[in-house]
Each structure stands twice: as C-alpha cells, then as structure tokens.
Image (cartoon, grey):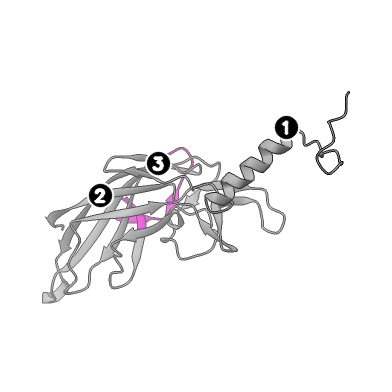
Amino acid sequence: MTPPPEGPTGRRPIAVPLVALVAIAGLGVTAALGGFATAPEKPPKRLGQGATVDQEQFTTTFVGSRTLSEPGLFGSPAKRFLEIELRVVNKGDETAITGLPYSGGLGGGSLGSSLLKINPAINGKYGASIFSPTGGGESVQLHPALPTSVVVKYELEDRQRAPKQLTIDVGTYEWRDGVTLAPGWFLVTEDDAGTQKPVVTAQVTLPVVPKGTSS
C-alpha cells in the first residue's frame, strides 16, 4: 500500500481507521447530549378494574373496591371498612399465603407482599388484613391452581373518609435458586443508588364504590 504523502512539516499524518473515526464522532454526540445516560426504565402498565396481572407466582385479577359498614356490638357505633377484592390463582407447586402488604425487603412469596403501595395510603386503625372468605370464616392459604377470592380489608378511622378511587402499585415474583438465600419466590427488583427496590409491574386504578351495610 502506498504511504500517505508527507505534510507541510515533512511528517506523514497518522492514518486513523474509519471505525475509530465513527466511534470518536459518536463520543462527541454523546457528550453534546449530556454524557452517557442509562436506558430509561420500562414504565409500569396502567390498568383498571377487572384487569389481570401475571405476577409469575400468581395470576391476580383486580375485581373492584368498595366501602361498607358493619353494625357495632352492644350499641357501639358501626364500623366502616374499605375492601379490595381480588381473584387469585397460585401458579406455584406449593400452598402460598395471603400475607400482608409490602413493608420492605424482597418479599417472601406471599400475595400481600406484591401489593407494593396503595395511593392514597389507606392505613386504617390496624393496617390491612388479607384473607380468603370461606363459608363464614377466613383463610390465609392459597392452594396451587385453585382460583380463590381474596379480600384486602382496612377498618377506617372514625373520621377517615374513603377515597373515590385508589391506585395499587403491583410487583411480580421470580424464582431464585439462591446462594445466600434458600430457594423460593422473591420480588423482582432493580438497583436504586445501591439499594434494591421492587419493580412496579403494573399500576391498577379502581373506583371505590359505597356498598352500604353488611350483616
């Protein structure tokens, strides 16, 4: 190959491969746009009443939300509640539990831990209870492959007003064989400034419907 001609200084210019030139140009564009940016996170699905979310360990349908009153005992004031009704199928091989709403960590394979946040917050008097109604009783078990009605129930404070609608941040699970942890279902997480936080798979908005008094 014929060497490039000498320049005015008597030195031959350095030959730069085309690929390197393209890479350098790309670096310039990146710098002009503000440096190296991480790819934007995939936004959660925005869903409404009746939507079904595949959570890997569970398939959960968000049936609806309602408020209701229950008569007080021995002349005491009626109690007011807010309920969220779900229809759940446990896709795992073992019986799972309903659990409690998410309170930190990697979850633990319970349905409740995948309910990451409710907006506006419904704290209630005693937090939430999550159960499956069973002929006058309550169960916390979710058996494999069996569609099960589940209720998330809050007792409202005396002067607490229920919202007209609420939005639930829903997480999802993945099976981990684990090295430091026992094998099991754990919430899918992402890094947030060095801390693992659960990924919000979907945001489900439900109207809150007044339902009167239950017996």
Q: Do the residues labelled 1 and 2 touch (CB within 8 Å)?
A: no
For badge 1, the amino acid type reads Leu
Q: In which quarter of the image is residue 154?
A: bottom left
To which residue does mark 3 refer?
A: 53
- Secondary structure beneath disc 1? helix
To which residue does mark 1 refer?
A: 18
Mark 2 Cα-neighbour bin, 10 Å: few <14, some 14–19, many ≥20: many
Please tell me which residue is depicted at 62% across the width and 41% down the height of the picture. 26
Depth check: give the residue in front, 82 or 19.
19
10 left or right of 189?
right
Does residue 107 appear anywhere in the picture? no
Question: Is 138 in the magenta?
Answer: yes
Question: Is 31 in the magenta?
Answer: no
Please tell me which residue is depicted at 55% across the width and 45% down the height of the picture. 94
To which residue does mark 2 refer?
A: 206
82 left or right of 1?
left
Please tell me which residue is depicted at 60% across the width and 63% down the height of the picture. 194
Q: Are marks 3 and 1 in contact (CB under 8 Å)?
A: no
- Secondary structure beneath disc 2? strand
Q: Are marks 2 and 3 in contact (CB under 8 Å)?
A: no
For badge 3, the amino acid type reads Val
- Viewer-side label of 3, 1: 1
Mark 3 Cα-neighbour bin, 10 Å: few <14, some 14–19, many ≥20: many
Part of the protein shown in magenta: 130-146
Q: Label 1 vs label 2: CA separation?
A: 57 Å
Whole-percent x, y for residue 101 in the image: 41, 61
